[in-house]
Image (spheres, rainbow, N blue to C red):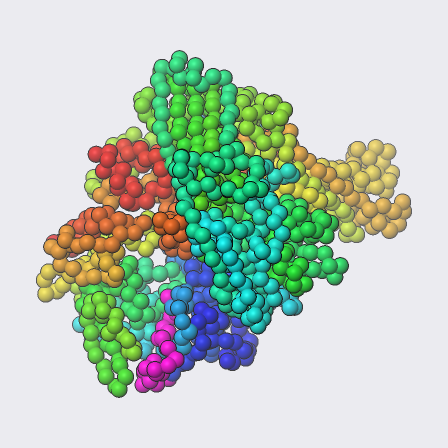
Amino acid sequence: MEINLTINGDRRQIECSPHETLRQILRREGFFSVRFGAETGETGADAILLDGRLVSSEIMLAVQADGHAIETVEGLAPGRGLHPIQEAFVTVGAIQSGYSTPAMVLAAKALLDDNPDPTEAEVRDALTGILDRETGYLRPVEAILRAAAVLRGENVDPIESALVRPLTDVDGTADFGAAGPPLDLPLAALRVVPSPEVPETQVVGKPEVKVDALRLVKGNPAFVDDVEMRGMLYAKMLWSPHAHARIMRIDDSKARRLPGVRAVLHHENVARVRFASGGQSYPNPLPYDQVSFDNKVRHVGDRVAVVAADTLEIAAAAVRLIEVEYEVLAAVFDENEAMSDGAPVIHDEPDMEGAYDAARNIVHHIEADVGDVEAGFAEADHVFEQTLRVHQVQQVPIEPHIAIAWLDSDERLVVRTSTQVPFHVRRMLAPLLGLPVRQIRIIKPRIGGGFGVKQEMLIEDIVGHLALVTGRPVRLELTRHEEFVSSRTRHPQTITMKTGVNDDGKLVAQLMRTVGNTGPYGTHGLTVQMVSGLRGLSSYNCPNKRFDCDVVYTNIPVPGAYRGYGAPQALFALEAHLDDVAAALGMDVLEFKRMNWTKVGDPLDMAAELGEGAAEMKLIPVVASCGMEECVAQGQRAIGWHRRIDPDWRQPADRPHIRRGIGFAMCMHGSAISGLDMGGASIKINDDGSFNLLFGATDLGTGADTVLAQIAAEVLGTPVEDIVVYAADTDMTPFDVGAYASSTTYVSGMAVKKAAEEVRRQIAERAALLLDVSTPGDISLRDRQALAPDGRSVSLAEVALHSLHQDQQHQIMATASYVAPESPPPYAAQFAEIEVDIDTGQVTVVSLVMAVDCGVPINPLTSAGQVEGGMIQALGYGHCEEMVYDKAGRMVNARLGPYKIYRSDEVPHIEAYLVQTMEKSGPFGAKAIAEIPKDGVAPAIRNAIANATGARINNIPFTPERVWAALQSTR
Amino acid sequence: MQAVVGYHRPESLEEALSLLNRVSPRSVVLAGGTSLNAAELPEPVEMIDLQAIGLDGIRTDGMVVEIGAMVRLFELTAHQAVPELVRLLARREAPSTFRNAATIGGTIGTGDPDSELLAGCLVYEGQVTVARAGGVVENVALAGLLNDRSKLEGSIITALRIDADGIGAAERTGRTPSDSSIVAAIGRQAPTGGIRLALTGMASTPILVEPAEVAALNPPGDFRGSSEYRLHLARTLTRRVIQQLGG
């Protein structure tokens, strides 16, 4: 049928079918800013204005919109330039991945057109239709309030760090509790606690605007799906309805006969090549327990077959015509049951190898020791033990997995994919597709969130197979339902903590026994659990430590990498356990933990046992920078820690069914994997003195491209706008392991710094020639100039033109790579204030404060965003997110809503403090920040509940009925 | 949504009813679409879009508020004639995007057991005007309609009428402040005396219930709340609502 839509003022007559959504039509008309998030519309990435109101275009038929007016962000500021709302989003640091930014901008426009002076609550209400997994909503709300002010003609302040006076003395100690009332700063203040050891810099350490902000805020084509390819086919998967079954027969004949179907693939026509899908360095850890299409299925949602067809509708219809006969097998979902006698064997295939004991479903067994824990327990004054369980949650990136594969004109395979690991994907695809690496190119454009779920070769082999078989471009995008059950999740674990401690509070022995549930495929099973051991036993000094771990196969949807990577699990257990130990000893928990936590000079003994790279060397790293004391001092002041001992505060007289509490958790993480993670960077100069910066590092919206550009700009004496970044293209950029292990700033940043230093040297040589200076080492770079000691200067443009065109012609350029010999830990103090309704069990989180020592934040705006968004994502882990299954292993809540993630109008008060320390091994003093915000929220809330009610709960999430049941048993 | 094989936008109620009551092809009423377009439809259907029929508008005579079936939830949140509690519940019913599209008629037709808005309409004596083929128009109590959806077959909801007066109160428990409630108790101090009480999360639809009968309910449970817990919540939240209303 034909419909009439006025889009951004332009009347169009459009052909469409009744079933097509408005989003599909808008994208077909070229409006790529309108994006897919969920087939049921909750994410709002698809939101547009219909007659001036924000609606989801995903759950509106195009025909419903016939005769109406539609606005998308493309209409806001056509051509170059930005609307004031867009300007505000850019300036305030409200854009991370940018996937949903167009929708937020439209929400702002609709609100401000109607109400030029909204309250914060009204702004948050307008944003309720847009789910954000990245920012915690703080800076988007701030952006809209700022835009409102600008549109009213008011002045607004530039964005600057708000320097907060340190609370530690010269000797590095602080008196917790003596600092007075919380600071009165604006909600979106950029709180930086400076260290005097950190030198002055021009660009590093400044809240620079993101280098990709423009394309994101304007909704310009940027993401995988924002391309049109002639003749592109659409792939649709057939997934297993059973948790465990053999495929006895597949009949694809009816599917093949459907007009428009171009390929149907499954185990009968795809080579059986074993691999492990986790995106990791060569060689991937064993076992290689997956194949592209198997003759067995091992979880509900496991791969069975795929169809490529001319349209998505035809592909879906063809999938329904594939007949499969299964022999259903018994399934097991619990990690402890899976190891017991009689449990079904999940990997019983004859070519299975590399598992520790496949017959008992044990993939890996890990042991690591320092000293002698049994002797430690024997000598300790007290021994405490408890068992905790952490559950399964999903990363929920707003952009699901999507990949498009095609053969280029040289008939090399190109895959444009939403991935965190382009180089690993290329290497891993080669044997699966029977192509050499040189015949494969992986391109990573902008990504709408990853959080580890995209640290995987997840669907690229499927589109690769299909592109090779059909000779046409092939696109596969997971639906939101499929993203839940057929991608990756966090590893659930059962954790037993046992601690030996003396009367004075000194730790004598620590044992952590973990059973990790890795679902039916090993992917990251070994390394996540190793990190659990590392993080669970590194925060505190203790002469005797032991980690004992089994990683177990079950039939749940597959756990993989998820931000934090074993640390959130371990630190939940550790920080809850030690809170209980402190209480049992009658000690103040801050003092107890301070007495034992690692400080500058302390050894990281577990790193020598469990660190992935350095383990062979058995070198024991030592803490070189640690701001933990300052972090706790700032955090406890900000949260009002002293209130927790006041019984009148805990039990407010005017609300008899409410109890209040404050909890604390200490966090520690790593900065990349020493001896393993490598990144490379290339820089070349252009005629105007600008530079192209090329690296393999993989910005998923975190701002990595910007941080690396700042590092280069600092060395080269230019503003960031003179650095043109291109990244994560395996043909064009140097290698990088990719975005994981919090490695980009610390490792890739150092590669960029070294490359820039070599370029600087070459510039200085040419400048010395031009300025007739005998020692090029005396030339310095500043403000786009190369300066001689006597003040004479020549511009970088002149240096470039001279060297490219005029004399002794030479392309000033350099490449460098870096692998770190150490992994200096960032530290953080996480505080939570909560309220519990003791009659219903409902927990309301009132405030979250995290003070983080990430060394020197290269960009405090993006760093703060990592903390704010990370805390809200971590809040979901502890508070309300869970994957729920029926007895047959089918997820019952694979939809946003039943699977609850926080939205804009319900987030607690959040505050991030960036506590500077000078980490000399990092570029300009930097350590990592990406994952540590995930580590402390769940235990801090757990400990707050204990403070409020006395109930010490050993499993998450803290949903109302669970808390209510715990309160019942405490009474 | 591949199942949508046809679309109509009738301009009169008669035309809509006539399309809806065709023996074939199977047709369904399309209001805002926030539920229908998110659903997996088992067989091919044609959509009968009601947006051009004129079922808009909120009118009051001071005693009763009449709300056209196609009134969007966002309009309910702002209209002064609508009782304050119902305005609040309309805002909480859905996020901004859905509120701007979803209709009161569609909300009634969907009958979500967790709908606090429907519970609010129940305690404000909701009456639904239902139009059937052949010019038949019926007023049905909202409670009866929610309990027996077969009354809607071949019919179109045209309006909802609720009382304009009486103080309301709501108590709810959910995983987070804006989560769909596990159980909510919605109450109203009826001007004639006594308390009207409705509960969500206790049956397949929101239900009117006498406070004294709450303890005897036997709700189905799910992962957010077992039967035992839901009953506990119902009793606790009912007590609080009654207390709020001064009972």
Q: Is residue A432 visible?
A: yes
Relative to A278, A831 lies left or right: left
A801 versus B9 height, above or below = above
In this view of the protein, which residue sits in the foreground, A352 or A466?
A352
Residue at 50% of width from left, 76% of height from top? A17
Residue A53 visible here: no
Q: Is residue B24 magenta?
A: yes
Q: Position of residue A681 (x, y in %)?
A: 70, 42
Which part of the image, by quadrant, shows the C terminus of chain A? top left
Compared across the picture, whether B141 is left or right of A710 comes to left
* Residue depicted at x 53% and y 27%: A626
Horizontal side, residue B61 vs residue B100: left or right: left
Can you name the residue that lies furthest to the left here? B193
Q: Tell whether position A505 is magenta.
A: no
Where on the picture, by quarter, is residue A87? bottom right
Which residues make up the magenta segment?
B11-35
Residue at image point 20% right, 67% down? B143
Q: Is residue A624 above or below residue A306?
A: above
Seen as rendered, the residue at the extreme right is: A807
